[in-house]
Amino acid sequence: MFWTDPLTRATLRAARGSKVGRILANDIYTVPLALRLAPASAVHADLHEYYPGLHDDNPVWRRLRMPYLTWLVEKYGPRPTSATTVGDEIAERYRTHGVDCDVVINAPERQAYSPRAVSAPIRVVHAGAALPTRRIENMMRAAAESRADVELSVLLTPNHPSYVAELEALARELGPRVRMLPPVPHDELLATLNTFDVGIHVLPATVTNQALALPNKFFDFVQARLAIIVGPTPGMSHLIEEHGLGAVTSGFEIDDIRSALDEITSTQVAEWKAASDVASTVLSAATQLPTWEAAVDSLSVPPH
């Protein structure tokens, strides 16, 4: 199935005759190709997600797709000389498949923003993909029902237009404390986020990959110098507690999120924003470079 896939065949044709030194294989789908083009000693595998758990809430996907992705991971994942993934929880899961991954978090370069004074009402923001498995409506309903002086803005990329339409209708129903805003280009995202006070990402464990997540938006919130509210997802909650960045909800349901929002105050949000400012150096791309350097240095260039 893999070697007859049109994308695989087109990639092999495009790469024919190339003089390959080192290969950085982006995601598990490219690892077999990299190993066809160069010896394993010259290949690094960068595995951003836990692929056998991408959509394991779907019975059809579990039956048809999970075995294929598990096969790719177990047959090809252990062979490259080095591998990385984006969080400790995913790395631990990959070890059960025989793949030893170092961790490079999805942190952007450090930005020269400063924490802004806390607004009244406190401005909360969620920005990301419009995926129904994320149950964004729970955060919206919680903000609308909270007794704290908050307003929530939601910026979504239109991954599922019908889901975006549902959320837009819900925002109109919930009233002025919840707003849907148009998404912004990625190079404008941090400047936009910096105008808010609190970044929120309560990501329910509806699929295994979400239960293991340590997403780039978490680090975007840090670089935008925001306070942060997350659910009890281990990768994110650990960093919240380690650096004093915000609050961790007790669960993923509306009541859990509302309870966390009910407790926030302007003084507390200001303290959390200041903590993000302090953490913006250690939780930035620069601290990840030594891991990349070691991975690339471990690769050998094949003779031509």
Image (tube, rainbow, N blue to C red):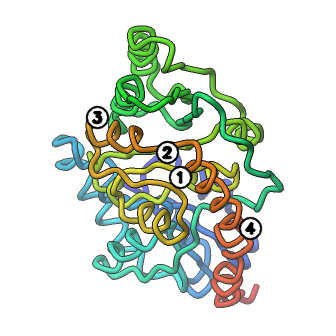
- CA gap between label 3 and label 1 equals 47 Å
Q: Which mark is residue 201?
A: none
Mark 3 highlights which residue?
254
- Residue 123 appears at what percent x and percent y? 59, 32
Q: Which residue is drawn at 41% across and 27% down?
A: 140
Earlier along the polypeptide chain: callout 3 or callout 1? 1
Instruction: Give the amino acid at mark 1.
Output: Arg
Instruction: Give the amino acid at mark 2.
Output: Pro
Task: Answer whether residue 278 is visible to the viewer in this image.
Answer: yes
Mark 1 highlights which residue?
9
Task: State which quarter of the image contains the C terminus.
Answer: bottom right
Relative to 101, is 239 above or below? above
Mark 4 highlights which residue?
18
Q: Residue at x 39, y 68 (%)?
A: 90
Instruction: Give the amino acid at mark 4.
Output: Ser
- Residue 166 lies left or right of residue 177; in this view the side is left
Mark 2 highlights which residue?
6
Count of numbered circles on the image: 4
Earlier along the polypeptide chain: callout 4 or callout 2? 2
Q: Residue at x 67, y 73 (%)?
A: 282
Kind of element beneath mark 1: helix
- Residue 288 lies left or right of residue 212; in this view the side is right
- Residue 91 appears at what percent x and percent y? 41, 74
- CA gap between label 4 and label 3 equals 54 Å
Earlier along the polypeptide chain: callout 4 or callout 3? 4
Kind of element beneath mark 3: helix
Q: Looking at the image, do the residues carrying marks 2 and 1 touch, with CB atoms under 8 Å apart? A: yes
